Image (tube, grey):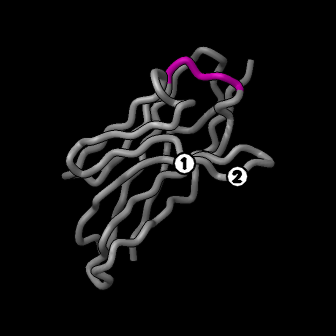
Amino acid sequence: QVHLVESGGELVQPGGSLRLSCAASGNIYSITYMGWFRQAPGKEREFVAAISSGGGTNYADSAKGRFTVSNDNAKRMVYLQMNSLKPEDTAIYYCYIDAKSVYLRAIARYWGQGTQVTVSS
């Protein structure tokens, strides 16, 4: 099995910063992408940011210039540094990996359970 555990979500004031972390573990053979989605109340889950194993990054327009995704391949960690937070950033943030497991050599997407980020004064 593959497990992802997020941490770092909390209540923060508008204009503040947060750093989310996600640790991947289990029977992972290789990871091609790691990243983040989010889901606000009453809305569909949406892409936020992703980073490839080679370091290439991709961001949603809403995240560009404010959020930075990074990773540590050796530790199988992915991070999301969020600055200049706005109330509309309030959501559950889910990390994911696109990876091959030891037993399933086809690439599959694995999800964490999510961490709540609330931006409010």
Disc number for residue 44: 2
Report the Cα–Cα distance between label 1 and label 2.
Answer: 10 Å
| Residue type for callout 1 | Phe
Q: Dots 1 and 2: beta carbons under 8 Å?
A: no
Horizontal and vertical percent for residue 60?
Answer: 51, 37
Q: Residue at x 47, y 38 (%)?
A: 20
Q: Name the image quarter holding the N terminus.
A: bottom left
Task: Give the total of numbered labels.
Answer: 2
Query: Which residue occupies the extreme bottom position in the image?
Result: 103
Query: Which residue occupies the extreme right position in the image?
Result: 42
Q: Residue at x 63, y 37 (%)?
A: 117
Q: Is residue 108 left or right of residue 71?
A: right
Q: Is residue 104 above or below residue 24?
A: below
Question: Is 46 colored magenta in this rendering?
Answer: no
Disc with the residue nearer the chain's start (1 vs 2): 1
Query: Which residue occupies the extreme front position in the image?
Result: 61
| Residue type for callout 2 | Glu
Q: Is residue 57 above or below residue 95?
A: above
Q: Residue at x 48, y 47 (%)?
A: 36
Task: Say which element carries label 1.
Answer: strand
The 10 Å Cα crowd at callout 1, few under 14, some 14 to 19, many 20 or more, is: some
Horizontal and vertical percent for residue 47?
Answer: 54, 46
Horizontal and vertical percent for residue 40?
Answer: 71, 43
Say which quarter of the image contains residue 76. Answer: bottom left
Task: Say which element carries label 2.
Answer: loop
Identify the magenta region.
83-87
Disc number for residue 86: none
Q: Is residue 19 left or right of residue 57?
A: right
The 10 Å Cα crowd at callout 2, few under 14, some 14 to 19, many 20 or more, is: few
Q: Residue at x 28, y 80 (%)?
A: 105
Question: Is 85 colored magenta in this rendering?
Answer: yes
Look at mark 1 in the image and give the residue it sits on: 37
